[in-house]
């Protein structure tokens, strides 16, 4: 069907061109010139309509070229022995056997809340949520009492602590000697995010404390129990390196 329409289109175009080329060569008599022009006009009209109809049939029967599907890029399999980036590994579950041992040692009553929290923090280095839930399950201590006690005493931590604990004194003597600049430089040097006190690798935790009892060494800080005084921002960085 589509092929026949194409043949008709070509034939109509050829007839129109032939008629256009032959018309000037014909020299009819003056009386018959008008009749010849009318006949040619009628003939060209029919050929034009036939050309339009065959062109429409040709276009209607034409099929668009099929699209080639895009080739998918092969995804390499994950390397053996390495976890996939889309499936992060979960940390191992917390061993809660220490909580049971601490409760057996200090008791299950509400009066044992502070000793139990202190023992849990000493063991885990902070107060994990799983350990606190276990503590509430096996003692008479309520979650509200744990939240109130852990938030009232500054030594209790609810977030993981780094491998090294840095305490910067912000007492009066240290404050006027530049303790704020010491803390800011340590946070910048360790890339500690805003709102956090531990660097992303959990190597250092920087705490601000009210007093370290070394006012004569102001400004002063303590790293894992070792005191460094008369600090400058550069001196505080060197104390961490050592």
Image (cartoon, rainbow, N blue to C red):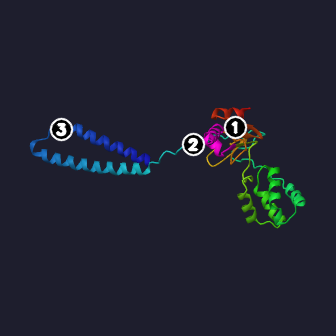
Foreground disc of the pair 3, 2: 2
Q: Which of marks 1 and 2 is nearer the N terminus?
A: 2
Q: Is residue 6 left or right of residue 174?
A: left
89 with respect to 115 (left or right): left
From the image, tell me which residue sits under label 1: 217
**In terms of secondary structure, what is the magenta stretch mainly?**
helix
Which quadrant is the C terminus positioned in?
top right
Q: Which residue is drawn at 78% across and 49% down?
A: 125
* Horizontal side, residue 195 vs residue 157: left or right: left
**Residue 81 in the image, given as x and y percentages of width and height:** 78, 40
Residue 70: image tag:
2
The answer to whether residue 172 is magenta is yes
What's the distance in space between the residues labelled 1 and 3, CA to CA? Answer: 122 Å
SS class of the residue under badge 3?
Answer: loop
Which of discs 1 and 2 lies nearer the camera? The answer is 1
Name the residue carrying label 3: 26
In the image, what residue occupies the spot 83% across and 54% down?
Answer: 119
Examine the rendered structure and indicate whether residue 133 appears above or below residue 125. below
Q: Which residue is drawn at 75% across and 57% down?
A: 129
Q: What stretch is highlighted in magenta?
A: 168-192
């Amino acid at each position: 069907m589509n092929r026949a329409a194409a043949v008709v289109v070509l034939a109509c175009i050829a007839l129109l061109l032939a008629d256009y080329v032959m018309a000037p060569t014909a020299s009819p008599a003056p009386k018959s010139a008008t009749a010849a022009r009318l006949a040619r006009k009628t003939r060209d009209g029919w050929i034009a309509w036939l050309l339009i109809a065959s062109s429409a049939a040709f276009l209607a029967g034409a099929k668009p070229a099929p699209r080639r599907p895009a080739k998918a890029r092969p995804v390499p399999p994950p390397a053996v022995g390495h976890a996939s980036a889309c499936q992060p590994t979960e940390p191992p579950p917390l061993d809660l056997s220490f909580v049971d041992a601490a409760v057996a040692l200090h008791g299950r009553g509400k009066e044992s809340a502070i000793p139990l929290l202190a023992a849990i923090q000493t063991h885990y280095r902070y107060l994990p949520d799983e350990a606190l839930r276990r503590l509430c399950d096996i003692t008479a201590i309520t979650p509200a009492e744990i939240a109130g006690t852990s938030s009232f005493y500054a030594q209790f931590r609810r977030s993981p602590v780094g491998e090294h604990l840095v305490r910067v004194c912000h007492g009066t003597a240290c404050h006027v000697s530049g303790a704020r600049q010491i803390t800011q430089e340590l946070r910048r040097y360790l890339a500690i995010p805003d709102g956090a006190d531990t660097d992303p690798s959990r190597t250092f935790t920087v705490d601000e404390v009210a007093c370290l009892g070394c006012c004569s060494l102001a400004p002063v800080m303590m790293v894992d129990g070792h005191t460094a005084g008369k600090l400058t921002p550069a001196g505080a960085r060197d104390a961490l390196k050592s």
